[in-house]
Amino acid sequence: MLGKKIVIKINKQKLAEVFTFLENPIKEEKEFVTKMVDKINFQKDIGFAGFKDKNSLKKFLTWLVYNNSKVNIWNSVTLDECKKKISFVLRKCSKVIQKKTIKIFIFPTISEFVINKMDGVSGFSPWKNTILLGVFRTENWSKAIKDTVCHELAHALALNFNRRETIGDDLIFEGIAEHFREYFLNGQKSPWVKALSKKKARQIFLEIKPMLKTRSHDLFRALFFGTKNYPLWSGYAIGYYLVKSYLDKCKEKNWIEILKTPPSKILREATI
């Protein structure tokens, strides 16, 4: 199953090309990651699965698959199961995808954080029209993969029009992705949105406001992954409330236009 490719279509529209690497991760991290990367060819539109070179992809996959985990069992999911869940989401969002073809790469993960905190599914969109998933079978993985694909799809589409260059951009991108997921999957607030009350979100937002136009990897990690100063997932909750205030002013939710809107514009007009 290493590097197997499938195509997802609706009528004659090709919604996605899905590349799967659903093998049991072996203890030798470098060997397993190298084996996967060797199966990923350069594509003119997305590079190496959204990365500019194989070394960058290797570093990311080592983190995605292993993340210093001590888990030594692999609860596999099947290609058919993944295809059904992904197809469900893409069909829901097909009008927003328009004529684009989304490239989705599915990898195994034994990350304890992903297994215990994210119901076994992690996602990342490093480049336009590109989604990378890490998957481990848990009790709720089938819901988690649909939620994750929908969230990451918002990023993958928005990156056709805007870039993530500042902390402010990050907040808006994540807020849009959560509202996008709720809208198309009729979902409820995610655990990361519930991480903060609106009052606490406002307090942290006012604290970081002077730094919104900067690119600080330390602040990003603190806001989105938690430190002693900020609860885990604070950035997602802040972004959610900011984007909600902007969307509440929209007469109708035209998601194509929302995804095209510069994050800086939304940030200027949003309140919390």
Image: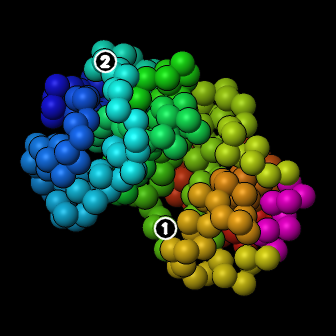
Instruction: Locate the N terminus and report the quarter of the image it occupies.
Output: top left
Q: Position of residue 210 (x, y in %)?
A: 72, 84
Instruction: Locate the C terminus and report the quarter of the image it occupies.
Output: bottom right
- Picture layout, residue 214 above or below residue 196: below
Q: CA distance from mark 1 to mark 2?
A: 33 Å
Q: What's the residue type where badge 2 is placed?
A: Thr
| Residue name at image x 54 percent, y 31 percent | 119
> Residue beneath label 2, please?
78
Q: Position of residue 174 (x, y in %)?
A: 59, 54
Q: Nearer the viewer, residue 110 or 159?
A: 110
**What is the residue that sits farthest to the right in this orientation?**
199
Q: Which numbered mark, 1 or 2, is in the foreground of this view?
A: 2
| Residue name at image x 58 percent, y 39 percent | 117
- Picture layout, residue 152 above or below residue 82: below
- Decide if residue 161 is on the left or right side of residue 19: right
> Residue beneath label 1, please?
164
Q: What's the residue type where badge 1 is placed?
A: Arg
Q: Residues within 10 Å of mark 2 (few under 14, many from 20)?
A: few
Q: Residues within 10 Å of mark 1 (few under 14, many from 20)?
A: some
- Decide if residue 18 is on the left or right side of residue 193: left
Q: Is residue 26 visible?
A: yes
Magenta segment: 198-206
The answer to whether residue 235 is magenta is no
